Amino acid sequence: KNEVEQSPQNLTAQEGEFITINCSYSVGISALHWLQQHPGGGIVSLFMLSSGKKKHGRLIATINIQEKHSSLHITASHPRDSAVYICAVARGSNYKLTFGKGTLLTVNP
Amino acid sequence: EAQVTQNPRYLITVTGKKLTVTCSQNMNHEYMSWYRQDPGLGLRQIYYSMNVEVTDKGDVPEGYKVSRKEKRNFPLILESPSPNQTSLYFCASSLSASGSEQYFGPGTRLTVT
């Protein structure tokens, strides 16, 4: 079993829909990251969380440390949100990172 | 402009020919790391460095070496590349090792024949 599991693996939505991507992990963590990777490869950091909730524009990330679960929400989705979204957990004080396999999101106009 | 640069961006080489992929950041970050990304396996950490002269193995260090002689540079060395090291490589940096946003380089696509 992978230490970091994301669901769903693939997600297709219509423009304007509310999107949720989930990340569950099985190890103790010091922080959790959400990353975005567009076709063509570049990776951008969206959020880093150690507790609670963060919001940036139409994106919201939450984490429940007790349940070992995080969610990434996209409100009013747009075709430019189409990308792979990757969850990564940082383990211990040495900040070793383990990644989920990613969720491919396609938003159709 | 704050950035992480990698060179080369694309490289095709042959088995056994030593190569170095450079990584440089201009943000005075303490923490730097190398990852490889493979279809079906996702991103995996190769090596990381918490500061100058401090490096440690990630999950897939076999066949790779790194050094951190200066804060801004963190080169990845493949002493004797093999075809199973064909991959997309990313360098990243962050302000500290205690948990901060990671900044990724543009990636290096390596093919070993």
Image: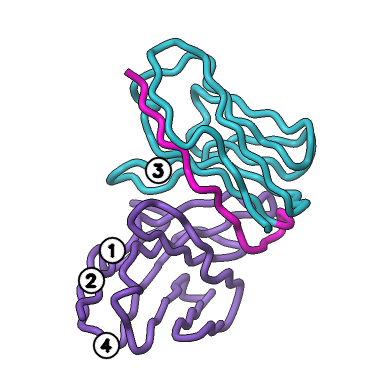
**Colour scheme of the picture:** by chain
- Asked whether disc 2 touches disc 1, contact meaning CB atoms under 8 Å apart, the reply is yes
Q: Which chain is purple?
A: A
Pointer 4 and pointer 2 on the same chain: yes
* Circle 3 chain: B
B20 left or right of B39? right
Determine the residue positioned at 47% across, 37% down. B9
| Upstream in sequence: badge 2 or badge 1 | 2
In the rendered view, tell whether residue B110 sits above or below residue A63.
Answer: above
Q: Going from the N terminus, do you reach mark 1 or mark 4 first?
A: 4
What's the distance in space between the residues labelled 3 and 2, CA to CA? 21 Å
Name the secondary structure under disc 3.
Answer: strand
Q: Which residues are magenta?
A: B95-113
Residue A86: x %, y % from top left: 41, 61
User: Could you tell me residue B62's position as x and y percent?
Assistant: 49, 25
**Chain B, hue in figure:** cyan
Mark 1–mark 4 distance (CA, rounded to whole Å): 16 Å
Q: Residues within 10 Å of mark 3 (few under 14, many from 20)?
A: some
The amino acid at mark 4 is Glu
- Do circles 1 and 4 both sit on a common chain? yes
User: Does residue A104 sit above or below A55 in this rendering?
Assistant: above
Q: Which label belongs to residue A17?
A: 4
Name the residue that disc number 3 marks: B37
Q: Is residue B56 above or below residue A71?
A: above
Residue position for label 2: A11
Is B98 covered by the magenta stretch?
yes
How crowded is the residue under tag 1: few (<14 C-alpha within 10 Å), some, or many (20+)? many
